Amino acid sequence: QKEVEQNSGPLSVPEGAIASLNCTYSDRGSQSFFWYRQYSGKSPELIMSIYSNGDKEDGRFTAQLNKASQYVSLLIRDSQPSDSATYLCAVGVGGGFKTIFGAGTRLFVKA
Amino acid sequence: GAVVSQHPSWVICKSGTSVKIECRSLDFQATTMFWYRQFPKQSLMLMATSNEGSKATYEQGVEKDKFLINHASLTLSTLTVTSAHPEDSSFYICSAQGTSGSVEQYFGPGTRLTVT
């Protein structure tokens, strides 16, 4: 059973702080990794994709991938109250054409 | 780019009736579309994967005769919930992968189904 594990949270950080979200996965053959943001009552929105070991930065977001440790993380710098949402880690399996989602981490950014 | 629409955004139906949900990729062609269901405060549950012109692949435990999926073109997939019951009430979300070989999925806004 291929799995993606996330801490359900909630993770609470003050406005302006760095939020760190973590994810581990079980399928060593996975090559594609994604972070989605889901606001309450809405569908997921893709915010980052990463395919190679190391860091990938996009604005306030940095995704980090360590395939040896089967670990993916998302850092949100200068967190804003509008970042409060559930963040879903997703891993491509079966050549990437199917995606397994974690249960999500709820993030609260306090003003 | 990569916009996916769903219609309707919400629907209320009586128990025993059928409901059809449409998923369209508006600005790209989708080789593969996925249908998910999400209950309150739970994660996404993949129901089925559909490829244009072929039969959908259903996940274990999902009744293919109850949840009919048709992927008629590279921009349209439909999910029909047949003989709906109150336990089918949920948030149904589709996603699409493009034909360019990218494995990224882009989600539609979802359809909230309530069966009374």
Image (cartoon, coloured by chain):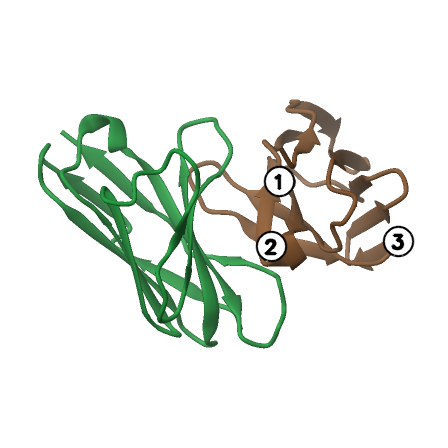
Chain colours: A brown, B green
- Looking at the image, residue B72 sits to the left or right of residue A4; the answer is left
Q: Is residue B10 visible?
A: yes
Secondary structure found at label 2: strand
Q: Amino acid at mark 1?
A: Leu
- The answer to whether mark 3 and mark 2 are in CB contact below 8 A is no
Looking at the picture, which amino acid does disc 2 mark? Leu
CA separation in Å, label 3 and label 2:
19 Å
Q: Is residue A111 visible?
A: no
How many residues crowd mark 2 within 10 Å: few (<14), some (14–19), many (20+)? some
Secondary structure at badge 3 equals loop
Which amino acid is tagged 3?
Asn
**In the rendering, which numbered label is found on residue B65?**
none
Residue at disc 1, secondary structure:
strand
Quarter of the image containing the C terminus of chain A?
Answer: top right
**Residue annotated with mark 2:** A46
Pointer 1 residue: A88
Q: Residue at x 79, y 44 (%)?
A: A28
Q: Position of residue A81 (x, y in %)?
A: 64, 37
The residue lying toward the viewer, choosing from A76 and B10, is B10
Q: How many residues crowd around disc 1 within 10 Å: few (fewer than 14), some, or many (20 or more)?
A: many
Q: Quadrant of the N terminus of chain A?
A: top right
Task: Give the labeled residue for mark 3.
Answer: A53
